Amino acid sequence: MHSSNVHVIDHPLVQHKLSLMRNKEASTNSFRRLLNELSMLMAYEVTRDVPMQEIDMETPLEKTRVKVIDGKKLVFVSILRAGTGILDGMLSVVPGARVGHIGLYRDPKTLTAVEYYFKMPQNMEERDIIVVDPMLATGNSAIAAVERLKELGPKSIKFVCLLTCPEGVANLQKAHPDVPIYTAAIDRELNDHGYILPGLGDAGDRMFGTK
């Protein structure tokens, strides 16, 4: 089921931190800290192919040409509210990136995504988008978010989550085969309530200490 467009980041540090986050005894504080660390590590993989540019630089010894990434061309789009946790970690690695927010909630009866907030940087057609949301469960929110972002004609879109399941991957790939998925794990299945099993519960609730 892995197509070349699904990247499981199986680095030992990523896997270790994810395992600690799964523990139901993990406090809000440690869950948030782990999510932050995990996001930094994932940012390293997700940005592996971002374009670079050359600039002039003076070292202590001489003038030279060096390569830098153009952070301003990168936009992290957080799916509210749980996406915030991944966003913070990634911004600490790429502080120059722009940030967009998209608010979606899941209608409990139909499980479809309803948009309530949308705020993006200007000139999206020059930019590469990295969409972040801890869980890719049914895939409905991700599909709705990507659809909405495609209207802005960005250069590229990637989707980053901590956890997903075969159903979520299949649904997002079917709707948007051109959007690569980066995740730390593909869990066993989705239950009837749209939760990933074994999973780690509701990422938003665990991150913010809400019920």
Image (tube, rainbow, N blue to C red):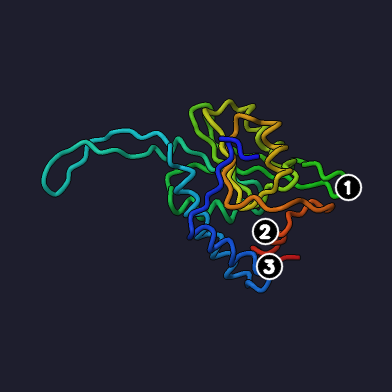
SS for tag 3?
loop
Q: Is residue 93 above or below residue 158?
A: below
Q: Which circle marks residue 203 in the picture?
A: 2
In terms of image quadrants, where is residue 171?
Answer: top right
Q: Position of residue 37 (x, y in %)?
A: 50, 60
For the residues carrying marks 1 and 3, which lies nearer the camera in this image?
1
Q: What residue type is disc 3 on? A: Gly
In terms of image quadrants, where is residue 154?
Answer: top right
Q: CA distance from mark 3 to mark 2?
A: 10 Å
Q: Which circle marks residue 109 in the picture?
A: 1
Q: What residue type is disc 1 on? A: Lys
Identify the residue at horizontal 26%, vertical 35% (top origin): 55
Toward the viewer: 183 or 204? Answer: 183
Q: Earlier in the sequence, mark 2 or mark 1?
A: 1
Graded by Cα atoms within 10 Å as few (under 14), some (14 to 19) or many (20 or more), the crowding at tag 1 reads few
Q: Earlier in the sequence, mark 3 or mark 2?
A: 2
Q: Which residue is mark 3?
A: 209
Disc 1 and disc 3 in contact, CB within 8 angstroms: no
Toward the viewer: 103 or 183? Answer: 183
Identify the residue at horizontal 48%, vertical 54% (top origin): 11
Q: Is residue 10 above or below residue 122?
A: below
Q: Is residue 46 above or below residue 122?
A: below
Q: Position of residue 138 (x, y in %)?
A: 75, 45
Q: What residue type is disc 2 on? A: Ala
SS for tag 1?
loop
Q: Is residue 103 left or right of residue 33?
A: right
